[in-house]
Amino acid sequence: MSAATTRSRTPDRLCAEAVDLARVAAEEAAAPGKVGDHVSLTSEGDRVVTHFFACEEPGYRGWRWAVTVARASRAKNVTVDETVLLPGPDALLAPEWVPWSERLRPGDMGPGDLLPTAADDPRLEPGYIGEDTPPPNSAFAEPSHDLAERVDAEDAELTDRTPADEAVGGRGTIAALAEELGLRRARVLSRYGLRVAADRWDEAFGERSAMAQAAPASCATCGFLVPVAGSLRQAFGICANEYAPADGRVVSLSYGCGGHSEAAVMPKAPQPAPPVLDSLEPDAFPLHASPDEELGHS
């Protein structure tokens, strides 16, 4: 028979009656005046009972002071076993702890913040391969424990190196060649990294957005679209229209907005009609009236 089956579910009478003893123990652990009414009790086993008291501490709504009392076999003296503050059924609890890597959201980083990237991040893959050790300037290179030894080793490598060393088997051979070809990055985006980035950009500025559904045309035919390099060029570009909602953002070629360069042509300012001339010769306008005109007026 197991020990669990030998425990009595009926609380021990003497332990159950030790409410005042349990209250004194709770008041010693809590701040003065923060222990409330006796809420309930429960049997923890043979001659072991836990008393629960309401917690009046601000910020601990629904919590209870739990005081466990016990007595020895055939003894009438009840003693305090432990006192602890426990949450009740309707207690106000903090949310479940989530690791920072899962709590991080876009826009959380600020000036001076550092975001470590795991060595096995699936979004990245080696920029070049060919040697077991990382390049000397890589973030994954093992740091030297003695700076002086590292400096001496570098000086010796520069002063004592022979042409044969430069041509064959040097540690920086692959790294130097990669840097000469413009491949200075130790890691680049993997196929998975490209796909998740494309899905994220397409969700924000893709053909399924409300703006694109109401657009007169897509970004593929817009003069404000700046192409990007690489394989993403086939599906994405950068908007360069300062009045568009996606200005400076990566947009899908199927995205669109009302700021399309060919959506409408602004009318030209109206120009006055040219004057109409009925003669190519100047008209004479005398300054004084002729004698006949003066006699006619008299």
Image: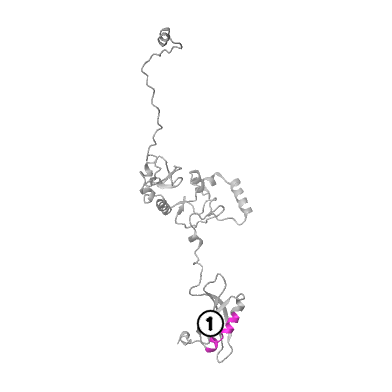
Q: Main secondary structure of the magenta part?
A: helix
- Would you place residue 231 above or below residue 74 in this image? above
Q: Give the x, y percent position of residue 147.
A: 62, 54
Range covered by the magenta-colored residues: 13-25
Note whether residue 229 is visible.
no
Point out residue 144 in the picture as x, y percentages from the top left corner: 59, 55
Q: Is residue 115 left or right of residue 297?
A: right
Decide if residue 138 is on the left or right side of residue 211: right
Using the rendered image of the protein, determine whether residue 162 is visible from the camera's viewpoint. Answer: yes
Q: Nearer the viewer, residue 200 or 133?
A: 200
User: Which residue is pictured at 50% across the width and 63% down the height?
Assistant: 99
The residue pinned by badge 1 equals 50
The percent coordinates of residue 11 (x first, y second) are: 50, 86
Q: Quadrant of residue 17?
A: bottom right
Q: Nearer the viewer, residue 18 or 193?
A: 18
Position of 6 with respect to 212 (left or right) is right
Residue 260 appears at what percent x and percent y? 39, 42
